[in-house]
Image (cartoon, rainbow, N blue to C red):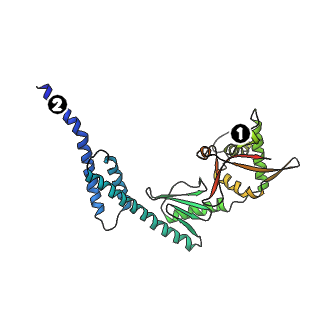
Amino acid sequence: MNKALLDTVQSAQSALDPQFKALRAATAALNQAVKLAGEEHFDALSMQKVQAKLDLVADQVADPAFADAVAGFSAATGQALNDLAFHFAHDLKETFEERGEQVTGRPPTLVVGELVLQIDIAVRKAQWFYGKEALTRPIPLSSTGILKAYEQQRKAIVERKIDVDSFLAELHKAWSEALAKRSQRTPGGRINLPEIYSQVVLNRQIPRFWNAPSRSTFKDYERAHFVRDLVLAHDASTVQVEGKSLRMLLGGATKNQAESASRSIWVPKSALDGEYYANLWFE
């Protein structure tokens, strides 16, 4: 056995093997791309799957023709996905309008009243939001399922009714308790808004929960409902405490605070407009 020759051959094999595997994967993906590109009507979702395969090997195949093919197929795939989203949104819009509901926006974001539908055509799902708060899990792209979820959330959020005075009293109680936990009073008495929300949730628990804490005894208060309640209380934000009239105030969030759900809450003014708030206090 010529060990030097064997080592040389094996070294060459090891060097070429990754290239061979990349070329084989690229060729297989190109064969699928050719088939899809030749169809009269583009299948956007199938193209997206092939595009993912091409992207995996794009950096491993140093060939200008292959690079051009990947770029061209990527552009066509993006356009096909946009077209698919547009047609779905158009059909959905017609369905809502037949019910007397006005739909604005364009894919991937549609607005129906105070609620927002975010469409992810790539995974064939959509999700309802109120402000930045998700109201549903991702829903399959079915008009029936999306309409059903909308009706549920419209009743739960848009038609929500609260006793504003009682809610403000809850906020003041939570704020006072949060202040009492601190060894030093915060500047201006400002307390983190998500912390206030958490304290309100705890204050709403019934004795049964404290006697036997469990998921079955926990009384939920969804964050989206808290946000809606803040909106409903905004125009009448004073509460009577020991004969004094105190006004609830919200402090805007910094950029860093706005990037964290534990440090700020988005309070909508309309479906797409609003502001991040980081603090709450009374004065």
Q: Which of the two residues, 280 or 85, is positioned nearer the viewer here? A: 280
Residue 150, position as x, y percentages in the image:
58, 62
Specify whether 22 is left or right of 164: left
Does the image show residue 40? Answer: yes
The residue sitting at the left extreme is 1
Number of labelled discs?
2
Q: Amino acid at mark 1?
A: Trp
Picture residue at 70% right of the left edge, 42% below the top: 209
Picture residue at 14% right of the left edge, 25% below the top: 3
Q: Amino acid at mark 2?
A: Thr
Does the image show residue 204? Answer: no
Q: Which mark is residue 8?
A: 2
Classed neighbour count for the residue bearing mark 2: other residues with Cα under 10 Å, few (<14), some (14–19), many (≥20): few
Specify whether 276 is left or right of 4: right
Residue identifier under label 1: 210
Residue 201, position as x, y percentages in the image:
69, 45
Disc on the earlier residue, 2 or 1: 2
Q: Nearer the viewer, mark 2 or mark 1?
A: 2
**Quadrant housing residue 76:** bottom left
Specify whether 48 is left or right of 261: left
Specify whether 222 is left or right of 38: right
The residue sitting at the front extreme is 64
Classed neighbour count for the residue bearing mark 1: other residues with Cα under 10 Å, few (<14), some (14–19), many (≥20): few
Q: Which element carries disc 2, helix, strand or loop?
A: helix
Picture residue at 56% right of the left edge, 67% below the top: 104
The N terminus lies in which quarter of the figure? top left
Residue 82, position as x, y percentages in the image:
43, 62
Residue 228, position as x, y percentages in the image:
67, 56
Q: Which of the two residues, 165 or 56, is positioned nearer the viewer here? A: 56
Mark 2 and mark 1: Cα distance apart in space = 74 Å
